[in-house]
Image (spheres, rainbow, N blue to C red):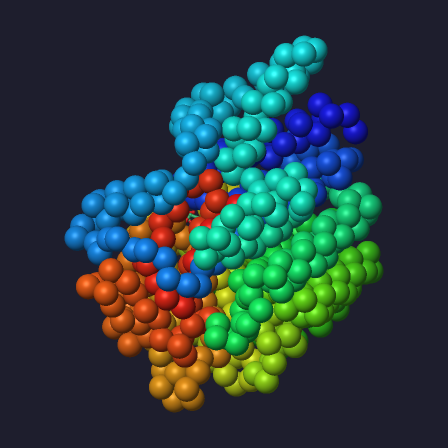
């Protein structure tokens, strides 16, 4: 692949991310973080509508200065923004300003692809344009073009008591296109290399993780749709799971796509044709390889939540991995992702807490609002399904669902600590919404999991709750640290 093509992938990946940030207000990460771009050589990005992105997140563990206790939302946000912006080098602020000024104009964002296509064919000028893109958009939102390039950023963040989540993913749409199996193999190699790198860095940075429940805050993120050649297998497998539930009268009152139950995986395998079954079996074995590599390196893996029509298979695999790799007597490796914008979320959360209790494993999950609102509505309409779609009809309902998650989870953590002296739940609140962050920090206090110290300027998380609570945000967007805290993790995404 030529250099120009490679750069074009970078532009497209970045552009997709900007479009998402801009058009839906969500912060789903579209980045080409790790070794991906140079090696994903055969993707015809635009035509296949594949999106290449990666994640790196961050955690902090020690004391960091916190200068605001909020009086009003606006003031708090402003102070928080000022605080985080003051730590950013001027060059980065300027490139960030250019990137955000650009993406605040939908017209410019829409024009960017055609402009880039045109300019990239003009010798010399194309190199100048590429250099500008790499120093502005790419640098604003992405960790690097290779794992090696990400390392200085990871180290700099760690200096601020912030750990890192690293990832590279290819995601797929249900548009009939298949991914080259070689690309899948490369994708898996990247994930394994990310795990090994994070493991190595964790051993350097975080020798003793017992004070944080075994979490060294070096994580790797994976997207399941990027791990098999044709996502149709996930769609068919998910339909087979739903069909079995209908036949057995399970989940009758649970909004689409239902809840993970025993027997889902077998239903998926039993209800699809051979070619899909082979893909699903290969997918499972890939996930096992990734999870055991993560366990070996004491690195946690985050399994992202995706579109609802894939989710029953993703739920069932995540559920099985949690049971196997998050046992009560060992370290915990697998983190699920739950989307609060789904109507099913409050019921799902209650069921997951109960299920982990009954089956005896640690429940680790990331709570997000959800990134696929537009495509969820479109598919619901296309498939002419009855009833309201899977996503809440209003933002206020999504917010209420997210808030329910905060309260329910933290009260359960507190209850487990009171009863057993420790919690079997670890939650990551992934959000840029300052109201959610405020609510979570307030509930931490209400539940006796944290207390204010040093004239209210610091939040000290109790030793038992350390490792159970974290926040996650995206690199490139202004960071709102929840509060200057001791023992609590904040993850920023790079
Ligand atoms: C660290 C991290 C990891 C993430 N991982 C995932 C993931 O695995 N899967 C995933 O799907 N997303 C993921 N996201 C993206 C996330 O789901 C949100 O899209 C994004 O964070 C914006 O939500 P917010 O809480 O930050 O901000 P807010 O601005 O408060 O919320 C925006 C969100 O509200 C919801 N919303 C907006 N309007 C409406 C409406 N009219 N009706 C109903 N709901 C509405 C949507 O979910 C929208 O994304 C991740 C985000 C972060 C920061």
Residue 229 pos. (x, y %):
76, 49
- Looking at the picture, tell me which residue is in the foreground, 283 or 104: 104
Residue 410 pos. (x, y %):
36, 72
Q: Is residue 305 above or below residue 23?
A: below
**Outermost residue to the left:** 71
Image position of 92 (left or right of 65)? right
Picture residue at 61% right of the left edge, 61% below the top: 204
- Looking at the picture, tell me which residue is in the foreground, 124 or 391: 124
Residue 318 visible in the picture: no
Residue 176 falls in image quadrant: top right
Image position of 340 (left or right of 221)? left
Picture residue at 48% right of the left edge, 79% below the top: 424
**Outermost residue to the bottom:** 419
Residue 90 visible in the picture: yes
Picture residue at 36% right of the left edge, 53% below the top: 481
**Quadrant in which the N terminus is drawn:** top right
Picture residue at 32% right of the left edge, 55% below the top: 65
Residue 49 pos. (x, y %):
65, 36
Number of residue marks: 0
Residue 153 pos. (x, y %):
55, 45
């Amino acid at each position: 692949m030529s250099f120009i093509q490679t750069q074009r992938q970078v532009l497209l990946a970045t552009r997709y991310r900007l479009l998402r940030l801009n058009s839906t207000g969500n912060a789903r990460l579209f980045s080409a973080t790790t070794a991906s771009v140079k090696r994903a050589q055969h993707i015809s990005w635009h035509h296949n509508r594949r999106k290449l992105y990666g994640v790196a997140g961050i955690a902090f563990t020690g004391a960091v200065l916190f200068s605001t206790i909020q009086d009003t939302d606006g003031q708090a946000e402003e102070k928080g923004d000022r605080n985080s912006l003051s730590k950013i080098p001027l060059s980065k602020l300027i490139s960030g300003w250019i990137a955000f000024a650009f993406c605040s104009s939908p017209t410019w964002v829409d024009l960017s692809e055609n402009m880039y296509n045109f300019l990239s064919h003009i010798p010399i000028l194309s190199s100048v344009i590429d250099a500008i893109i790499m120093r502005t958009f790419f640098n604003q939102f992405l960790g690097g073009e290779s794992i090696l390039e990400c390392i200085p950023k990871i180290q700099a963040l760690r200096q601020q008591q912030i750990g890192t989540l690293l990832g590279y993913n290819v995601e797929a749409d249900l548009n009939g296109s298949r991914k080259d199996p070689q690309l899948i193999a490369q994708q898996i190699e990247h994930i394994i290399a990310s795990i090994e790198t994070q493991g190595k860095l964790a051993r350097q940075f975080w020798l003793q993780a017992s004070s944080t429940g075994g979490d060294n805050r070096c994580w790797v993120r994976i997207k399941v749709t990027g791990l098999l050649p044709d996502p149709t297998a996930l769609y068919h497998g998910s339909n087979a799971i739903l069909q079995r539930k209908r036949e057995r009268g399970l989940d009758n009152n649970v909004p689409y796509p239902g809840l993970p139950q025993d027997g889902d995986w077998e239903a998926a395998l039993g209800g699809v044709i051979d070619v899909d079954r082979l893909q699903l079996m290969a997918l499972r074995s890939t996930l096992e390889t990734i999870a055991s590599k993560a366990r070996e390196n004491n690195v946690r893996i985050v399994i992202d939540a995706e579109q609802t029509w894939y989710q029953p298979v993703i739920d069932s695999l995540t559920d099985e991995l949690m049971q196997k790799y998050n046992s009560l007597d060992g370290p915990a490796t697998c983190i699920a992702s739950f989307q609060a914008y789904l109507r099913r979320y409050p019921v799902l959360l209650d069921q997951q807490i109960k299920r982990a209790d009954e089956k005896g494993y640690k429940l680790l999950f990331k709570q997000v609002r959800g990134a696929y609102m537009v495509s969820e509505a479109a598919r619901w309409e296309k498939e002419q399904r009855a009833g309201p779609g899977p996503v809440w009809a209003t933002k206020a309902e999504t917010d209420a669902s997210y808030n329910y998650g905060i309260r329910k989870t933290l009260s359960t953590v507190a209850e487990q600590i009171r009863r057993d002296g420790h919690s079997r739940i670890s939650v990551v609140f992934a959000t840029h919404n300052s109201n959610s962050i405020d609510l979570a920090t307030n509930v931490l206090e209400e539940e006796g999991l944290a207390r204010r110290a040093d004239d209210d300027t610091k939040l000290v998380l109790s030793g038992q709750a350390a490792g159970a609570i974290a926040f996650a945000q995206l690199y490139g967007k202004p960071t709102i640290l929840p509060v200057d805290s001791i023992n609590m993790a904040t993850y920023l995404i790079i």
